[in-house]
Image: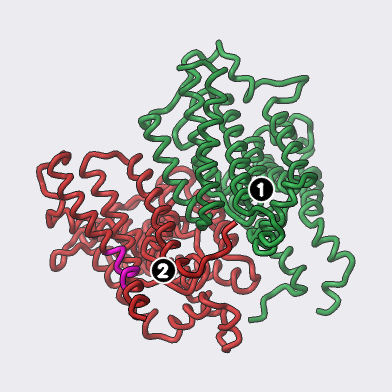
Amino acid sequence: MKSEQSKKLLKSGAIWLFILVELVFFSVAGEYFALSDKAFMDVDNMLLLLKQSAPIGIIAVGMTLIMVNGNIDLSVGAIFAIAGIVLLDSMSWPIFAGMGDGVIPFAWGLALLTGATLGAINGLIVWKTGVDAFIVTLGSMLGYRGLVFMFNGENPTSNLNWTLVDFAEAQFLGLHTATWFFLAVVAVVWWLTRYTIHGRNAYAIGDNRDAAVNAGIRVGPHMLINFVLIGVLAALSAVVFYSESGSVNPNDGQLYELWVITAVVLGGTKLTGGAGSIIGTLGGVLAIQLLRKGLGYIGADTSTVNLVIGLILIVVLFIDRQLNTKGKEALNV
Amino acid sequence: MAGFANNEFVKLLGKQGILIAFVLFMVVFTIADTKFISVDNVLSVVRSSAILGVMAIGVTFVVISGNLDLSVGSMMSFSTIVVLDLHDKLGPLMAIPLMFLMTLALGAFIGFLVGYLKLNSLIVTLGMLSAIHGLTLTYSGGKNMDIADKSGTWFSVFGQGDVIGIPVPIILFGLLAALFGILLSKTPFGRKVYAVGGNPTAATFSGVPRARTVFLCYLISAFCVATAGLIQASRSLGSQNTVGQGLELEVLAAVILGGASLLGGSGTVFKTLIGVLMLGFIQNGLLLMGLPFYVQFVITWGIIILAVWLDIAIKRGRFFVSA
């Protein structure tokens, strides 16, 4: 029993240990290779790191719940782009003319509503047709991206609102606006998984769907709620991101799903469902961002970052499996 | 609802649904636009589908064996860049086999991880998608690759040449489809692929070597990717590092559209071909009708989900899930 507990602790602590190793490694390596004379663990650098983790991180929190539930969502990158377009474009719609900055809450609301709607479409299809979430969201990833391109072709959609930019660049207690949004999302969804019936049922469904059905849990509505949630979070991520940048490229958000899933898996969530935690995902997001920033800091280019992150993902998967199947050897042929 | 599953017509629809849909689709488009079915148009659609199609043949093996391959897109960029680079350094005669070897090595690595180490294929190939992209960028230094002497090389034959009026990409596509179609449906190896994907435990107890079979499926996939890279490189004689980006999902869409189940154990090369051609003709048909290029994404979305849904609904006997 004792070793069970220590193993569990080791597993949930592994990602934080990894983060610590990264911090030490990049600080030491930075002494020799860094291009700038600032330390890696410089306060501003770390604050910027948190801010830059926010767009991926907010979506990753939602993806954790989806994956705990035993589903997957590949369409988040496309939802991100559509929500960004709605946010920026709606501010110049004629119905909102003459409202000045009063248009901002409406634009935000519309963007979030768009995310919720697109998520609900995914969720309803998964629920009602019984088609696997992987296929449904693979399809909608294409379809939603098509909608993005149909809106404005290959051209970017731009609308720079300085009030929004000021808001996005503001710092409260040292942390940037984006960081606050990220932390708030982590806190709310953590509470959702720990203290609500929906959270508990989501784990139960992911762990053993048949048992959950037999226990009287209605699987479909819970999946729908999670898909709506991730849609809203993808839109929120877009709201946070595009408030500052003010311009959406139709290709934006592509490959986000891969980064998000990587972060969630690094954080210890099982692809098969039933296990995973929001705090672990927070760790996964930070670990990836540290790696990107750290490798850049010691002068490696993006190609190395891609290579390293890909390989680390595979190594983590390997270690995780070694920890899990020790003792109960599976058929090995 | 009781009669739903017993109806002969519905049974036929379930078995040959994709073929029927394809024929219906072609008829509608032919009526809408007479240019659609002309020899020139059909050839051009098949030629432009060849790269996607060649990759889809390999992925069909992987999917039937119960796994996924999301790395084919970035692997295709890798082969394209490598063969273009080696072409100028070593000449095409050396470049092509070397590129095939390097791509097969990547496939073998993935096959080892998924087959022998039994790691989850989705995550492994997701990781490899990123890793191979990094590898390609490191190899090329982020620069575009171009063949220096574009008019003086016979290398362009794979992408631009034709034999008795049939473009070479189509011939390669057809040859591979025939070869691997026979391998899958007529040989002991093919039956092992179905067995491993259909019920891994039963396959293991029946003495089917699961690990080796999965390993070989990834090798086949890598071989197809290398061929696709060859066609791509030869067609454009120059390339960006991201030429195959996003193709993995289009390939998967074609395979699924062809009716292969992601759970493994079902699908055929022929049905995948239909899936590939359907995507190609949808794209072409919509363009001929004057719709913007991007509408095809939305239509494809609808068609994929409808196709899979119908398939499931017919097996289930009901359209909607009750719970």
Residue at x 41%, y 37% (from the top left corner): B135
Residue picked out by circle 1? B61
Instruction: Residue lying at the far bottom in this picture: please name it.
Output: A216
Kind of residue sitting beneath label 2: Gly
Position of the C terminus of chain B, as image quadrant, is: bottom right
Chain letter belonging to callout 2: A
Residue at x 70%, y 59% (from the top left corner): B307
Give the foreground label among 2 and 1.
1
Residue picked out by circle 2? A62
Chain given the colour green: B
Residue at x 56%, y 13% (from the top left corner): B153
Which element type, helix, strand or loop, lies under badge 1? helix
Position of the N terminus of chain B, as image quadrant, is: bottom right
Query: A63 or B44: nearer the eye?
Result: A63
User: From what the image shows, is residue A260 above or below residue B188?
Assistant: below
Chain letter belonging to callout 1: B
Chain given the colour red: A
User: From what the image shows, is residue B95 above or below residue B248?
Assistant: above
Q: CA distance from mark 2 to mark 1?
A: 33 Å
Query: A229 or A93: nearer the eye?
Result: A229
Q: Is residue B139 left or right of residue B40?
A: left
User: From what the image shows, is residue B2 above or below residue B67?
Assistant: below
